[in-house]
């Protein structure tokens, strides 16, 4: 039986970002905020995006994020990013700015601007700290206890570091339960235990079981998986080409230096592995 990856961002959107997903979305948000002793959320309104069509889902560069609004008007954006595009920090600030500036209309007051929280679930190391969960605000450089404003709050949840975490405490730490549920590498037995511990995770699993019975959802899920696979394959191929081109360039430099020193072509061939014709052309 196929095991579906909850961190496929299209499937994550189906589990957390549609009307009817409020229970599990709220529980996950409070697991994230509670692990940093931040103020809990009491109610969320999911802001659905109905524009996701097959060509968007199949586009490996498109971003499918979950957007919610709390009962006190705070905006929260959740993004899953499994591939490192080398721009995560700048992109999350752009997303934060987009949501923040949406909070004021023409002629509105600056006081109307909402607090915006970005939560990024990533599968690569972009924050060079040991913690698998980091949270950023606007603090004064020399007086770290002084917060300029709380309207900016950005979280990074690193699945790579979470998997390496020793002595996980899924029984007492809700965020670790959720990450165990999201992790495709979690064993079937452990997954069953996690679902038993948490009613919201049980609801998320039921939602996953339900939506993956839909042929169109499965098609788009696999489109998204293929987009990820194609991107990884392209990056690996480019890296290998880079290594090969780098190695060839190094061999040419060695051959040129050897020729300048008067070494025989046959010896240079043995040293560098370059063919005789290439060496002669130098």
Image (cartoon, rainbow, N blue to C red):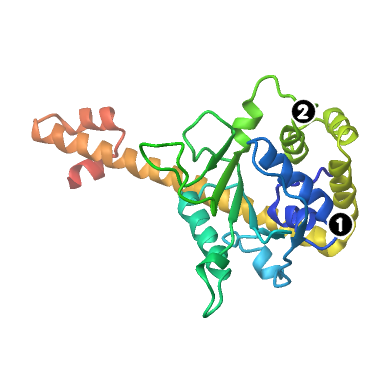
- Asked which secondary structure carries label 1, the reply is helix
Residue 173 in view of the camera: yes
Q: Residue at x 86, y 28 (%)?
A: 189
Nearest to the observer: residue 3 or residue 73: 73
Q: Earlier in the sequence, mark 1 or mark 2?
A: 2
- Asked which secondary structure carries label 2, the reply is loop
Q: Quadrant of the N terminus?
A: top right
Q: Quadrant of the C terminus?
A: top left
- Counting every numbered tag in the picture gives 2
Q: Residue at x 57, y 64 (%)?
A: 99
Residue 265 badge = none
Front label number (1 vs 2): 2
Give the residue pinned by disc 1.
Answer: 211
Q: Residue at x 60, y 34 (%)?
A: 160
**Residue 56 image offset from top left, x and y in percent:** 65, 67
Q: Residues within 10 Å of mark 2 (few under 14, many from 20)?
A: some
Give the residue pinned by disc 2.
Answer: 170
């Amino acid at each position: 039986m196929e095991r579906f990856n909850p961190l496929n961002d299209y499937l994550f959107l189906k589990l957390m970002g549609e009307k009817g997903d409020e229970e599990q979305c709220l529980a996950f948000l409070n697991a994230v905020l509670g692990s940093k002793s931040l103020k809990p959320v009491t109610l969320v309104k999911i802001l659905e995006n109905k524009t996701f069509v097959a060509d968007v889902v199949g586009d490996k560069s498109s971003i499918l994020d979950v957007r919610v609004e709390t009962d006190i008007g705070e905006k929260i954006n959740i993004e899953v990013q499994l591939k490192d595009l080398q721009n995560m920090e700048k992109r999350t600030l752009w997303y934060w700015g987009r949501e923040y500036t949406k909070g004021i209309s023409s002629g509105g007051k600056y006081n109307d601007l909402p607090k915006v929280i970005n939560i990024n679930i990533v599968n690569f190391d972009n924050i060079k700290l040991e913690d698998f969960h980091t949270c950023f605000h606007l603090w004064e450089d020399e007086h770290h206890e002084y917060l300029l404003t709380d309207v900016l709050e950005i979280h990074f949840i690193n699945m790579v570091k979470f998997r390496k975490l020793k002595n996980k405490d899924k029984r007492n730490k809700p965020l670790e339960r959720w990450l165990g549920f999201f992790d495709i590498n979690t064993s079937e037995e452990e997954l069953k235990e996690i679902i038993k511990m948490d009613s919201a995770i049980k609801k998320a699993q039921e939602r996953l079981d339900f939506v993956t019975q839909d042929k169109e959802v499965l098609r788009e899920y696999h489109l998204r998986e293929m987009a990820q696979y194609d991107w990884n394959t392209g990056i690996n191929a480019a890296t290998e080409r880079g290594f090969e081109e780098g190695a060839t360039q190094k061999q040419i430099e060695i051959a040129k230096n050897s020729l300048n020193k008067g070494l025989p072509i046959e010896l240079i061939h043995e040293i560098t592995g370059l063919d005789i014709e290439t060496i002669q052309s130098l």
